[in-house]
């Protein structure tokens, strides 16, 4: 990590000019929308519990990508990529709990679980692109909610 300005928002041709240009941000927005839709069917007593936590974690993913990309240094961007990864882990845990509590079926969370997995890989790739790393820096975690 360095304190040099990062290039993903830079002036190189083909490079994103804004976080909105990042596919990982766009997919994060799509996941957040899916989580909002999924949680509308949860019991009303969970409105301020699990529903709130899941929505907060889902919104945090694209928010951290946006904030990191808007920062001036590579080190800061990498830190916010890590925050987004942490939010994905929280959301995966919360989806697992929602399934185990019977609020939603495994089948109904499969698309979200797949999106979480894809976003993890994309964030790893973004980190490598930002830092110039050629090797994988973070271990890949497998979601429990996709297992039978």
Image (cartoon, helix red, strand yellow):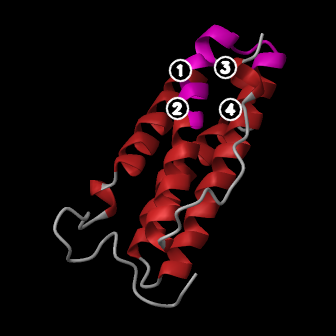
Q: Is residue 133 above or below residue 75?
A: above
Is the C-beta separation of discs 3 and 4 under 8 Å? yes
* Inter-mark Cα distance, 1 to 2: 6 Å
Q: Secondary structure at mark 4?
A: loop
List the residue tagged with mark 1: 111
Is the C-beta separation of discs 1 and 3 under 8 Å? no
Mark nearer the N terminus (1 vs 4): 4
Mark nearer the N terminus (3 vs 2): 3
| Camera-nearest residue between 32 and 51 | 32
Mark nearer the N terminus (1 vs 3): 3
Is the C-beta separation of discs 3 and 2 under 8 Å? no
Find the magenta span and give its range: 99-117
List the residue tagged with mark 4: 47
Q: Secondary structure at mark 1?
A: helix
Residue at x 66% of width, y 38% of height: 54
Question: Could you tell whether 85 is left or right of 123 in the image?
Answer: right
């Amino acid at each position: 990590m360095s304190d040099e300005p990062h290039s993903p928002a830079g002036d190189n041709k083909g490079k994103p000019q804004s976080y909105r240009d990042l596919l990982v941000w766009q997919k994060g927005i799509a996941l957040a929308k899916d989580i909002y839709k999924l949680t509308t069917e949860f019991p009303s007593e969970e409105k301020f519990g699990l529903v709130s936590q899941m929505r907060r974690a889902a919104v945090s993913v694209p928010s951290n990508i946006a904030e990191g990309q808007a920062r001036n240094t590579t080190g800061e961007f990498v830190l916010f990529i890590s925050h987004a990864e942490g939010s994905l882990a929280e959301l995966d845990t919360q989806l697992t709990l929602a399934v185990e509590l019977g609020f939603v079926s495994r089948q109904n969370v499969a698309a979200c679980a797949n999106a979480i997995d894809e976003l993890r890989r994309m964030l790893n790739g973004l980190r490598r692109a930002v830092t110039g790393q050629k090797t994988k820096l973070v271990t890949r975690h497998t979601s429990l909610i996709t297992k039978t």
